[in-house]
Image (cartoon, rainbow, N blue to C red):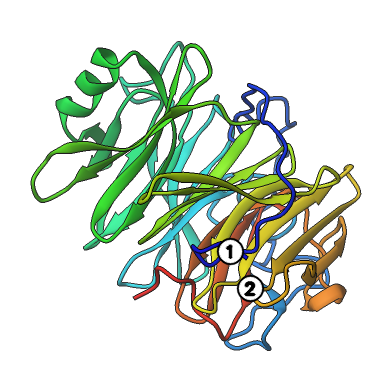
Amino acid sequence: MGKNGFSFRSATACFIAIIFVLSITGFSRAEVNPRYKPIGPQASVKKSGLDGEITTVFGTGAQGQSEYTMDHPRLIQKDSKGRIWFVDGSQKNAKLRYLENNRITTVADLVKSKFNYQGYFLASGLAIMNDKVYLAGEGNVFTLTEGHIIPLDSKINKYMKENQYAHIFRMEQYKGELYLMLLDKSFQYGFVKYSLVTKKIEEVLPRKSYNAPMNFYVHDKGILIACKSGYILYEQFFPRQSYMVLNASEDAIMDVFLDQNKDVYYMAWANQSYVKIKMLPYDDEEAVIEVAGSIRGYQDGYRQEAQMDYSTDFYWDGSGMLFGDMGNHAIRKLWLSTKPSNAN
């Protein structure tokens, strides 16, 4: 058991690699009839659920970008009005959208913005604070004004150029600040935070190589990093230290969070065959508990009855974790009684 409160698993050196989870070009588009109702196969919309149950919030199981359909929804957020925001579509047709009253509104066509790159827009993070929307693209962070995205602060792009960073790989929010995982051309990643109050940028972790990182989670003492290569890594702020939390080569780990009991939850895909949410209990260094999920598919249910497909991007909504079920073109929810460590 490490001093920082995690159960550290066997360490293995990370090799340099990069895989963008948001690079989902190549999926075929489907023409969808609006008669579809906002539920999926063997799924039902519920206002409450059991601890460990997965339900559908919205999604037909069909691919599209109508007011009733989605196209690989991800980067889930929620505002004070109850609207669920997300990025939809591939790099070639990416849109910023929100769900309200069982209908979807498209707010901004990101590919048609002047900030696209050769007809593409790679969204790498979404945050909502005080009902203001912040969207990370490859080279900048944007805000939303009357359906158009505009750069938040020129200092962000300037900092990246001065420090030879090529992309914003991922963005998360924590305590009123934006945390950016930046990628340079040598495939090393550094972490900085941007204060929305002082407008200052501060390095929080020096650049380092990670083996196929996908998502990260911030709390007071450090950052957890989920890697598609099967690792969960922990970077402690002070005293500065790196730890291997999990080495599970059979799983592609897509997202991670820490609950208030110091248990580590993560989204795992395996060999194109199953999608599961698993948990590493704080009080047992050897145990790995399967919280929910089973073979790939689309089915609501309690624990192993549930089925998902290419799911990622946890977001706490007050009673559970929303997530994008990209393969089913749906937004789903894992009901939980325990909050994540960084929840209000």
Residue kind at label 1, given as amino acid type? Phe
Label 1 neighbour load within 10 Å: few <14, some 14-19, many 20+: many
Q: Is residue 58 visible?
A: no
Residue at left offset 73%, top offset 64%: 277
Horizontal and vertical percent position of residue 116: 39, 20
Residue at left offset 80%, top offset 77%: 303
Q: Which mark is residue 6?
A: 1
* First along the sequence among labels 1 and 2: 1
User: Mark 1–mark 2 contact, CB under 8 Å?
Assistant: yes
Q: Which mark is residue 54?
A: none
Residue at left offset 37%, top offset 50%: 239
Looking at the image, is 115 positioned above or below residue 81?
above
Horizontal and vertical percent position of residue 237: 37, 49
Local SS, label 1: loop
Horizontal and vertical percent position of residue 325: 67, 55
Looking at the image, is 259 positioned above or below residue 267?
below
Looking at the image, is 280 positioned above or below residue 180?
below
Residue at left offset 81%, top offset 62%: 298
Q: Which residue is mark 2?
A: 282
Q: Alpha carbon of mark 1 to alpha carbon of mark 2: how far?
A: 6 Å
For the N terminus, give its image quadrant.
bottom right
